[in-house]
Amino acid sequence: TIALANSALKAGQTTTVTITFTEPVSGLDVSDFVCGSGSLSAPTANADRTVWTSTFTPTLNANDATNTIELKLTGVTDDIPNPGVGS
């Protein structure tokens, strides 16, 4: 899952983004994300590698249903290592 600490932001403000996986993953980096209305910092993992956090900074003052954060799972692997599938 992907959750934002605050979803009512203006350009220049920031919020924490929490990405939660059901099992430990490796290889997650900023290039795995697509977010057309802002930018994300490099994600960092908790000790179990199941919860990752990043900082989102919007570039526009826009309230639009198309403002989304997409995670391309092909950039991550589990401990087997099986590659992620989909987004």
Image (tube, helix red, strand yellow):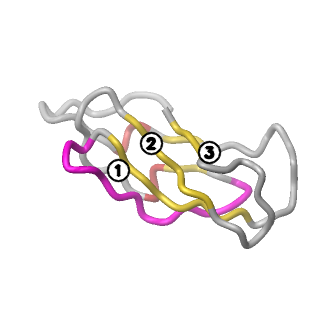
Residue 58: give x, y in percent of width and height.
Answer: 71, 62
From the viewer's perspective, is the residue at label 2 or at label 3 nearer?
A: 2
Q: Which residue is mark 2?
A: 19
Q: Amino acid at mark 3?
A: Ile
Residue 4 placement, left or right of 1: right
Residue drawn at x 71%, y 48% as measured from the top left: 7
Q: Amino acid at mark 1?
A: Leu
Cα distance between the residues tagged 3 and 1: 14 Å
Q: Residues within 10 Å of mark 2 (few under 14, many from 20)?
A: some
Residue drawn at x 73%, y 73% as measured from the top left: 12
Q: Is residue 55 above or below residue 67?
A: below
Residue 77: give x, y in percent of width and height.
Answer: 25, 38
* Residue farthest left in this picture: 80
Residue drawn at x 80%, y 63% as measured from the top left: 10
User: Marks 1 and 2: CB-CB under 8 Å?
Assistant: yes
**Relative depth, front residue between 75 and 3:** 3
Q: Secondary structure at mark 2?
A: strand
Q: Secondary structure at mark 3?
A: loop
* Residue farthest bottom in this picture: 12
Residue 19: give x, y in percent of width and height.
Answer: 44, 42
**Does the magenta segment cover residue 44?**
yes
Say the numbered circle drawn on residue 28: 1
**Does the magenta segment cover residue 17?**
no
From the viewer's perspective, is the residue at label 1 or at label 2 nearer?
A: 2
- First in sequence, mark 1 or 2: give its number: 2
Q: Secondary structure at mark 1?
A: loop
Q: Is residue 50 above or below residue 7?
A: above
Residue 67: give x, y in percent of width and height.
Answer: 76, 46
Q: Residues within 10 Å of mark 1 (few under 14, many from 20)?
A: many
Q: Amino acid at mark 2?
A: Ile
Residue 79 placement, left or right of 12: left
